[in-house]
Image (cartoon, rainbow, N blue to C red):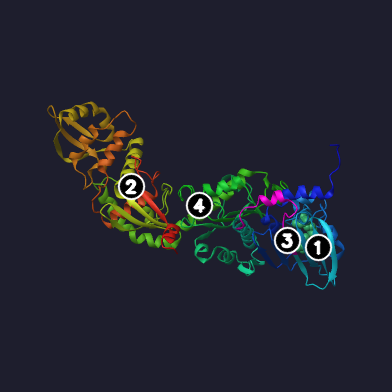
Amino acid sequence: MAIQRLAEEVIDQIAAGEVVERPASVVKELLENALDAAAKSIQIEVTGGGDERIAVSDDGLGIPAAEIQLAFSRHATSKLRATGDLARLNTLGFRGEALATIAAVSQLTAITRHQDDRLGTRVFLEGGKWRRQQSEPSPRGSTFIVENLFFNTPARLKFLKHPNTEKRQLARVVERYAFLYSDVRFSYLQEGKVRFHTSGNGNRFDTLVNVLGLAHARQMMPLPAAELRGVAALRGSIQVNGFTSAPSLHRADRNQIAIFVNDRWIQDTRLMYAINRAYENILLAGRFPYAFIDIQMPKDQVDVNVHPTKSEVRFQQPETVFAAVFQAIQNAHLATETNPVSLAFTAQHAETKKRWFDEWVGPPDYRSTELREVAEEDLGEKRALPPRTLPPLRVVGQIGAQFIVAEGPAGIYLIDQHAAHHRLLFEQMKAESEQGELAPQELSQTHHQNLAEEAAERIHNLQEHLKPLGICVESFGPNRFAIRALPRQCLQPHCEVDQFLPALAAADPSEKDNLLNVLTAQAAYRDGQLLSMEQQQHLARALERCPNPLESPQGSPTLIHITRDQLAREFRR
Ligand code: ADP
Ligand code: MG
């Protein structure tokens, strides 16, 4: 083929591929135009997956009759004159592409009246071709009706997902802008039915209630206006506002995480990562928060002209923005953890817990750092606690003298008392031995024990491994041993001193941590053991901050989580 210039029409269709990927992109562009036109009220109506019909009406400035043709030609915009304007932009649009490209791949009707015009204009374009234009009386503002999207680009049409998927995307776009522009009234209709609407009263929490529903919105925490530290504070001009979910609210995908920069909804994988990082020890793996994060920063520090959809931006100092977002969410967690209500609640239980903590680990003069901190936290003396790895659990009770039933914000947890306790003791003893704190605890009376010949020999050979574990044992005849001290974890009321040596004798000391594993398995609560409410609660509390709470050292699960959704499904709610 000889080289030829492409026809305008073909150029438009190619360009359309970049701006208009799917029906949701049409809604996004039309919404941005309406907002740029200072609309106070916007109605969005979609039919099918949006490929059939999308209509967006606003009460904004409208387009002057004399400019309407220009509005539909490419690179025609009222929002930008020179490239220098980009750094000062006050509008969402600036590329002058959207109307031309949407018109190129659909049948488009526009009815608009500029406030200075007496009559409005109605135009109809098909595949970018100008079909009709007429004057007619119409209210101030604009309506764009986009029908049969991609009717002339079948390849694109084929790539559309199931209408339900497209519908979700459409709704999401509207929800995001409704949140961001809470002072604008939005109504969103599907198949003629109102899906949601907002009042435009400027209150973002109200908007969250409208889009998420009250039950979910209630579990959203506002990002507090706390000071940012370190690198995020360097450029004091970054502000992070919005809402993020309490540990009780999460979902299996990232679809309810929205990031806004300078009043623009954007996609950014690094910031997405920052948000999820801030939940790392709070949500279980595979669960994601809800977050509506609004970042305001100097316009000259962010380039919005990176991609035709304007939904990617480039930050001059990405790490600063990352830190700002991460800290803002952390601050929200802290603010909620120390809020007066939860402190008042835990203070009531603090005394009981302190008592329990003393009882739990044997002699009262010896206190585990971790447990003391848990108790002290409850008295309001907040120390550096290990980070949470599970949401707060409310113990309901024990069943079958084997499992603990607990309620978490996101459903039910069934805890295997042996497996969980085994994990806790293992982590505790390991940490103590690493810090050289694993001290042997003298028995009030030396304990004598006979072992079978083979086991006795193995214990002889293990001597040097047992000392560092806090076990003091001496041979007292060929197969007889005297146990003088054990680590305090092995001296709990339910433990039998007799049980440890035979178990250790059977263990393979060459494998790392194997002896500790065997020892703590012996010291852990047993199946069939009745636990007091306090013991159960304490176990749950400790598990919440255990670095590895989901598996016992032997690899069996410590807990089973049944989500609310699963329960609702089972009960066909
Ligand atoms: P851009 O938004 O980048 O300027 P568009 O193709 O989206 O480009 O729109 C072209 C122009 O049409 C805009 O600059 C604006 O002047 C006008 N326009 C589009 N939609 C509206 C609307 N809803 N109300 C008023 N003017 C509009
Ligand atoms: Mg635009």
Q: Is residue 555 above or below residue 476?
A: below
Asked if the residues shown at circle 4 and circle 2 are in contact, with their CB atoms under 8 angstroms apart, the answer is: no
Asked if the residues shown at circle 1 and circle 2 are in contact, with their CB atoms under 8 angstroms apart, the answer is: no
Local SS, label 2: helix
Given the image, on which type of amino acid does mark 1 rest?
A: Phe
Local SS, label 4: loop
- Front residue of 444/130: it is 130
Say which residue label 4 marks.
Answer: 252
First reached walking from the N terminus: tag 1 or tag 3: 1
Kindly identify which numbered label has been placed on residue 375.
Answer: none
Given the image, on which type of amino acid does mark 3 rest?
A: Glu
Q: In which quadrant is the C terminus drawn?
A: bottom left
Q: Nearer the viewer, mark 4 or mark 2?
A: 4
**Location of residue 510 in the rendering, given as x and y in whole percent from the top left corner:** 31, 28
First reached walking from the N terminus: tag 4 or tag 2: 4
Kindly identify which numbered label has been placed on residue 124.
Answer: 1
Say which residue label 2 marks.
Answer: 420
Say which residue label 3 marks.
Answer: 147
Q: Say which residue appears at 53% left-offset and 63% top-offset.
A: 217
Q: CA distance from mark 1 to mark 3?
A: 11 Å
* Few, some or many residues within 10 Å of mark 1 (<14, 14–19, 20+): some
- Front residue of 540/528: it is 528
Given the image, on which type of amino acid does mark 2 rest?
A: Ala
Give the quadrant of residue 257. Answer: bottom right
Q: Which residues are magenta?
A: 144-163
